[in-house]
């Protein structure tokens, strides 16, 4: 069984990777995602916890030969800002995925900090934006792409796309809203 699993993993890597770089990926889940297990099944799908979700992402990263190096899930914007300031300097991470969740419509400080990392960032949401009563995510301007409406599977889509973009360099860094230290140096 273990042998078969390893076989599938290397097949996945062969199919989806164009480099063997061990990218270091960070994941942010914003306010209310701590309570994922109790959130409505209609929008979130079969009940699962934030730990289940993090394990799912970590397993896919391992199968692709990259690392889910850092993660945060917090109900407090300040915690997320401190994490961004501390964990994304010194080029310790290569890319990020974020579900801003409760910060989606008003987390301007987090959006600025995300943009200033200069990293390729993919925004993920369980639901699609047409369920948001005409509201739009303020984060979309600061990220290179968005996965919406695929519930937990959107995280897998985001990881595959992020790794593909990192491998090929095929993404638009100017999608980051603010000019980052990294881009200024380039
Ligand atoms: O908390 C959330 C979750 C969400 O980001 C999603 O994953 O669908 C959508 C947001 O509108 C909401 O505030």
Image: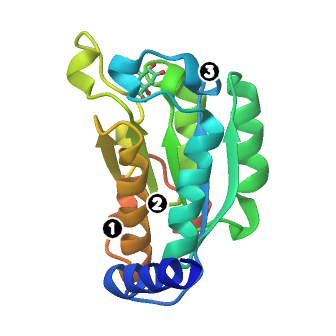
Dot 2 or dot 1: first in sequence order is 2
Residue in front for this viewpoint, 129 or 172: 129
* Image height of 146 relative to 138, above or below: below
Residue drawn at (76%, 31%) of the image: 79
Disc 3: which residue: 35
| Residue that carries the numbered disc 1 in the rendered image | 171
First along the sequence among labels 1 and 3? 3
* Residue at the image position 71 percent from the left and 67 percent from the top: 92
Give the distance between the C-alpha atoms of the residues marked 2 and 1, in whole angstroms.
Answer: 8 Å
- Residue 16, compared with residue 24, is above or below; it is below
Q: What element carries label 3?
A: helix
Front residue of 135/23: it is 23
Q: In this view, does 30 lie above or below 94?
A: above
Q: How crowded is the residue under tag 1: few (<14 C-alpha within 10 Å), some, or many (20+)?
A: some
Q: Where is residue 70 in the image (x, y as percent from the top left)?
A: 70, 55
The residue that label 2 is drawn on is 120
Q: Determine the quadrant in which ligand 1 lies.
A: top left
């Amino acid at each position: 069984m273990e042998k078969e699993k390893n076989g599938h993993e290397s097949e996945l890597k062969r199919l989806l990777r164009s480099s063997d770089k061990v990218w270091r990926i960070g994941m942010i889940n914003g306010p209310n995602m701590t309570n994922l297990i109790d959130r409505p099944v209609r929008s979130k799908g079969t009940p699962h916890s934030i730990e289940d979700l993090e394990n799912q992402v970590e397993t896919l990263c391992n199968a692709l030969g990259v690392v889910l190096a850092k993660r945060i899930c917090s109900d407090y914007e300040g915690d997320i800002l401190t994490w961004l300031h501390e964990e994304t300097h010194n080029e310790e991470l290569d890319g990020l995925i974020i579900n801003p969740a409760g910060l989606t419509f008003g987390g301007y400080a987090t959006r600025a900090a995300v943009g200033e990392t200069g990293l390729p960032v993919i925004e993920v949401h369980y639901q699609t934006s047409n369920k948001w009563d005409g509201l739009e995510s303020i984060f979309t301007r600061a990220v290179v792409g968005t996965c919406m409406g695929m519930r937990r599977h959107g995280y897998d889509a985001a990881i595959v796309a992020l790794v593909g973009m990192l491998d090929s360099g095929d993404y638009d860094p100017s999608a980051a809203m603010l000019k980052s230290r990294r881009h200024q140096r380039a």
